[in-house]
Image (spheres, grey):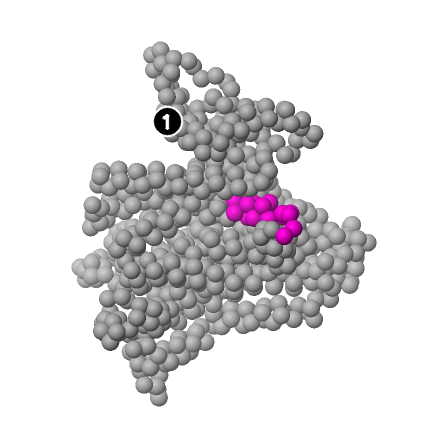
């Protein structure tokens, strides 16, 4: 198992390297540069700026020095400075030495921020939104799937699967404006845009206070984002449940006279939920990386908006940073799922 | 030997009177019959046929062209819309000439939605074709030859899987839009850009989908081929000296068609959504080409004042995606009755 995890982690590095390579090639293949938006920039100043951000180096030098800055930890005697080009995600003081790791570089177009600043301030918002969406997806999807399976081919089944089809058919850009119009504009129950928490965040990810002032901003976007995934969960729960209730051990449980509710809760549900739990990982990754549609619709200051803007601004470091972050999320959550799968189902052994 | 042997359960469960079981025809006929019995799928199919007709005869249906502006009628609405959205009443320009209103440039919303059908349906039909061709060819090669070829090809797919799909397509679109936007005349990029302009910007979206949407198809094809490859009839074909290509096209592909059709139909809403989403964030079709996505985006900005401008194109998009989802679900139930509700 340890071997397997190590191999997967090694593989993760390879994947990230390839992802970084493709992204780097693509974004430098796009004509234009980060300073195109500035008016009447004298060529000397432009050259100076490019020199400052090392944009005048050959591309392969830029690529490998970027990878070096991001991956290789360093131990120095000098404390980190406040410069955006010297901002490390992980810093620790060890005696007289400073341990510094993961410098994603300065944002080129927003002058006073580093990519790590964006991670610290915008990622938590996307993360919170993703968590809420996942919770809503589970809260809607699982009961719906169980209900459908227990009433197989009866009306609750059709209702449940109808809701599931609704969930996959009505995309964010349809449901978002619709709900904003109903609850934000017409009824004015909920704010139509924005987010209820501001940095600094507790533990780097969570908002300081959980109250109505915070939740009222999260309800609409989380519901819009979670509904599509709830359909996936509902279908999977239903299918897996249908399969499990035909198993021999369910017949045994019924034969020994257990109450039907006991059979369902203790014997069927526990086994039926294993495959469901395993999709939660990729689903969570998809939700966190997919928030940017929702963020655009609801004007939420999350990571997604920065990504879209960074592409049109040619903010190279931000593009690289966000794509890598999303890729890490995806690959890691898949790995976690595979491990959980092995833990939950002892029949599975990775060698 | 053409007989798809995948569905023994289907054959024994509902034998069709007057048909000899085992003919390849009867299977598809039976699937069709099952499909027709499924009311939701039938409704979906009828809606899709209607949409195709609307797209084909858009010129006859739409009262205006999609680009015809009339600034004097900017944001105009007919009376029934003001009844639907009472908040409009105090300030809206009333003009009965527009069936569901006009946008901020005075272009008829209804006509634009009608013409927008063309874009969405083009995605619905061309998206699957592109991803099917790339995915099936890739997956077939991988599954058919196996061994080291298979290993390498599947690792490539794994890496592409780790690439956040929407981000990749956004990057690609930014790349296409800017690289091929105004190149010098006579270069290759210039002609591609011209071609794209002819398509109203759709060509790049199709290329983007072609480059990102085929991995699932490739995996499925490979898996199917691996399971079919060892069957006796393939061995028999090999024994009588059939070539690789012949085995591939005559014996393997027809037998793995079912799951591929199901997967493609179920991914059609995804292609439609990708185009709408790209247009929504401004990387999709070129204005003034009407896309439901860009109409929703424009309308969302005026959501407070003129909700009709966002909600009607949103309705059109939702109905279309419903129709394709219903049809896809029905097709899955019809082609693989055992799988009802187990996928996706």
Q: Is residue B269 magenta?
A: no
Q: Nearer the viewer, residue A217 or B251?
A: B251
Q: Is residue A53 left or right of residue B8?
A: right
Residue B84: % across, % down: 69, 58
Judged left or right of residue B115, residue B168 is: left
Up/down of B55 relative to B68, above or below: below
Residue displayed at 39% across by 56% down: B216
Q: Percent from the top left, x then y, of residue B99?
A: 72, 63
Q: Chain of mark 1?
A: A
Q: Which residue sits at x=61%, y=71%?
A: B53
Name the side, left or right, on which A165 lies relative to B148.
Answer: right
Q: Nearer the viewer, residue A105 or A257?
A: A105
Residue under numbered circle 1: A72
Residue A297 seen: no
Q: Is B256 rendered above or below residue B15?
A: above
The reply to whether residue A317 is visible in this rendering is yes
Work out which residue is located at the far right of the displayed protein and give it.
B72
Question: Which residue is situated farthest in the front direction here?
Answer: B186
Please state, as top left, top right, bottom left or bottom right, where the C terminus of chain B lies in the image: bottom left
Residue in view at x 58 percent, y 52 percent: B188
The segment highlighted magenta reads B171-186
Q: Residue at x 51, y 68 (%)?
A: B44
Task: Decide which of A329, B47 is in the foreground and name it.
Answer: A329
């Amino acid at each position: 198992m340890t071997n397997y995890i190590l191999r997967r982690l090694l593989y993760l590095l390879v994947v990230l390297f390839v992802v970084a390579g493709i992204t780097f090639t693509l974004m430098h293949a796009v004509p234009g540069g980060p300073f195109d938006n500035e008016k009447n920039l004298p060529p000397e100043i432009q050259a100076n700026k490019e020199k400052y951000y090392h944009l005048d180096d050959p591309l392969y030098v830029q690529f490998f020095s970027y990878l070096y800055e991001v991956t290789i930890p360093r131990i120095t005697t000098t404390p980190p400075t406040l410069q955006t080009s010297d901002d490390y995600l992980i810093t620790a003081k060890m005696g007289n030495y400073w341990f510094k790791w993961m410098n994603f570089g300065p944002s080129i177009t927003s002058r006073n921020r580093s990519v790590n600043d964006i991670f610290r301030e915008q990622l938590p918002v996307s993360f919170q939104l993703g968590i809420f969406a996942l919770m809503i997806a589970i809260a809607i999807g699982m009961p719906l799937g169980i209900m459908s399976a227990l009433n197989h081919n009866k009306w609750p089944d059709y209702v449940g699967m109808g809701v599931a089809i609704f969930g996959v058919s009505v995309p964010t850009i349809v449901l978002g404006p619709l709900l904003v119009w109903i609850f934000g504009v017409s009824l004015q129950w909920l704010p139509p845009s924005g987010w209820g928490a501001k940095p600094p965040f507790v533990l780097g990810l969570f908002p300081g206070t959980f109250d109505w002032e915070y939740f009222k901003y999260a309800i609409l976007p989380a519901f819009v984002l979670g509904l599509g995934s709830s359909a996936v969960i509902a279908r999977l729960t239903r299918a897996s449940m249908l399969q499990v209730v035909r198993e021999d051990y369910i017949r045994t449980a019924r034969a020994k006279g257990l109450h039907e509710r006991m059979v369902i809760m203790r014997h069927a549900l526990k086994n039926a939920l294993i495959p469901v739990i395993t999709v939660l990982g990729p689903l969570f990754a998809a939700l966190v990386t997919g928030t940017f549609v929702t963020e655009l619709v609801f004007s939420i200051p999350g990571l997604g908006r920065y990504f879209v803007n960074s592409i049109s601004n040619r903010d190279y470091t931000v593009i690289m940073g966000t794509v890598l972050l999303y890729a890490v999320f995806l690959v890691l959550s898949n790995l976690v799922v595979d491990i959980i799968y092995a833990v939950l189902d002892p029949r599975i052994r990775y060698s | 030997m053409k007989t798809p042997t995948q569905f023994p359960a289907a054959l024994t469960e509902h034998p069709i009177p007057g048909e000899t079981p085992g003919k390849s025809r009867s299977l598809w006929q039976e699937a069709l019959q099952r499909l027709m019995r499924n009311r939701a799928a039938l409704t979906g199919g009828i809606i899709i046929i209607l949409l195709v007709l609307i797209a084909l005869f858009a010129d006859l249906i739409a009262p205006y062209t999609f680009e015809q502006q009339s600034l004097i009628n900017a944001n105009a609405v007919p009376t029934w819309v003001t009844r639907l959205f009472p908040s409009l009443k105090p300030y809206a320009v009333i003009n009965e000439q527009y069936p569901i209103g006009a946008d901020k440039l005075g272009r008829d919303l209804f006509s634009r939605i009608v013409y927008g059908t063309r874009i969405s349906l083009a995605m619905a039909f061309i998206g699957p074709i592109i991803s099917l061709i790339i995915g099936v060819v890739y997956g077939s090669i991988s599954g058919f030859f196996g061994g080291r070829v298979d290993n390498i090809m599947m690792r490539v797919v794994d890496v592409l899987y780790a690439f956040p799909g929407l981000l990749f397509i956004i990057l690609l679109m930014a790349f296409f839009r800017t690289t091929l936007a105004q190149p010098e005349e006579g270069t290759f990029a210039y002609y591609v850009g011209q071609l794209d302009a002819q398509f109203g910007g759709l060509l790049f979206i199709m290329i983007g989908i072609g480059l990102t949407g085929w991995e699932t198809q490739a995996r499925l094809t490979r898996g199917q081929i691996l399971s079919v490859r060892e069957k006796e009839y393939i061995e028999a074909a090999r024994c009588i000296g059939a070539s690789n290509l012949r085995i591939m096209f005559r014996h393997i592909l027809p037998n793995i068609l079912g799951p591929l059709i199901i997967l493609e139909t179920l991914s059609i809403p995804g292609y439609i959504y990708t185009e709408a989403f790209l247009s929504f964030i401004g990387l999709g079709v070129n204005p003034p080409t009407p896309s439901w996505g860009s109409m929703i985006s424009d309308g969302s900005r005026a959501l407070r004042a003129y909700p009709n401008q966002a909600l009607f194109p949103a309705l059109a998009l939702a109905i279309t995606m419903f129709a394709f989802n219903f049809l896809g679900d029905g097709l899955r139930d019809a082609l693989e009755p055992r799988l009802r509700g187990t996928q996706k």
